[in-house]
Amino acid sequence: MASRKIYFAVFGSGIGHVTRILEIAKLLPSDEFELRYSSSGQSFSFLRAKGFGASSLKCPPLDVEWASGGGFSSHKVLPGFPFMFNNFLKQLAFERNAIRAFDPTLVVSDSRLSPLLAGYSMGYPVITMLNQFKILFPPRFRRRMGRFYERIAGDALGLMWSLSEKVLVTDLPPPYTIGEENLAGSEVSSIAEFVGFTAPIVEMSPERVRRAKENLGLDNRPLVFCQISGPDETKARLADTLLKSADLITRNHNLVISMGYAEGSPEPRRLSNGGWLFDWCPIKDELFELSTVIVARAGHSTIGQCIDHVKPAVLIPIHNHPEQISNAEKFEKLGLGAMIRSEQLTLQNLTESIEKCATDSAYIQRLEVVSAVSKKYRGVERCAQIIRGMA
């Protein structure tokens, strides 16, 4: 029987957070560790789809509001803040009860405040994994007073994150920190450690890559692989633009689009122009390896994968999403690919950006430099090592 128990509390929006937690969990032997997961939304659905339903708890959701156009809705969030705070209190109560019932030797919170406060208040040691210490305001609010309040909120969050025994920053150290604006100015330096990216590093055999290429009938043209991640409400406009651009893209490239629906069909559908469309892509690692250019949102895990795999990318942040906008700006600033703001997305600038990323060798050269830095930090292994040592 396992002698140590670890309670993983995972951020519910998207699947980047839960994917990295499951990669860490693989390195924790089942005869030594008993694991339990707490999450909501897409992460909880993903845990069930991957066979972890029996060890997963569905906590009350706490997420931002999304506008009808698929972007972050500041108009809904700000007036609804009292209701969000009430939901946070419900989540906090849930986590206290769940942690008390499981009685873990360690709580690991991936980007969630409620399990940190719940564990701390009951005397349990807590490790927090973060790629942002503070909440950035949407661009339209980031004027002088907006930045003032943003700094106050950041300082308050920094104090709360500092209740952790240790904070694992899942990013590269300066000057290559992708989330530098999200991490700046927080007073947790004494307990924070940069552990590098925690995107899965899959050992890809030539046979798997060859089989994926043959099954889709890809020819020798460069492959553009489009991953549409994030909350389902945010996907429609980007998907529509990609599908309308498909005729132009497939003139010079192979094209595969993944909608990223965790409970969708894994069977691809052939598009009239020769491209492929997946609801859920079971061969995304193979396609990442085959691709010349990635088109994606600007989530931290996705950017880490692009850097580790040396893949130029066209990043299209979720509309009005401050963290993704900041990530994409830094990615472009480092010369690793192109950024297109969601409200500025057109067929023309999308296809032009793809073509530039596919043909400009300078992107590859700069990616190789940053990738070499990233390879010194084996983030998943380092997180597992720290967790084992503290559990």
Image (cartoon, helix red, strand yellow):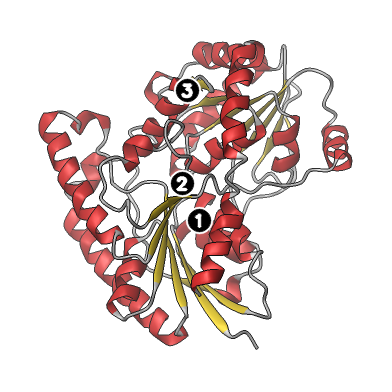
Q: Nearer the viewer, residue 277 or 328?
A: 328
Alpha-carbon span between mark 3 and mark 2: 27 Å
The amino acid at mark 2 is Pro
Residue at 72% x, 12% y is 252
Which dot, 3 or 2, sits closer to the camera?
3
**Whole-percent x, y for residue 104 in the image:** 47, 81
Can you tell which mark lies on residue 42?
1
Residue at 61% x, 70% y is 52
**Whole-percent x, y for residue 118 in the image:** 32, 74
Q: What is the quadrant of residue 207 in the picture?
A: top right
Q: Can residue 28 be seen at all in this image of the molecule?
A: yes
Q: Can residue 68 be seen at all in this image of the molecule?
A: no
The amino acid at mark 1 is Gln
**Whole-percent x, y for residue 2 in the image:** 62, 84
Which residue occupies the extreme bottom position in the image?
1
Whether the residues at callouts 2 and 1 have beta carbons within 8 Å, the answer is yes
Tag 2, which secondary structure? Answer: loop
| Vertical arrangement, residue 254 with respect to residue 185, above or below | above
Tag 3, which secondary structure? Answer: loop
Residue to which mark 2 is pinned: 231
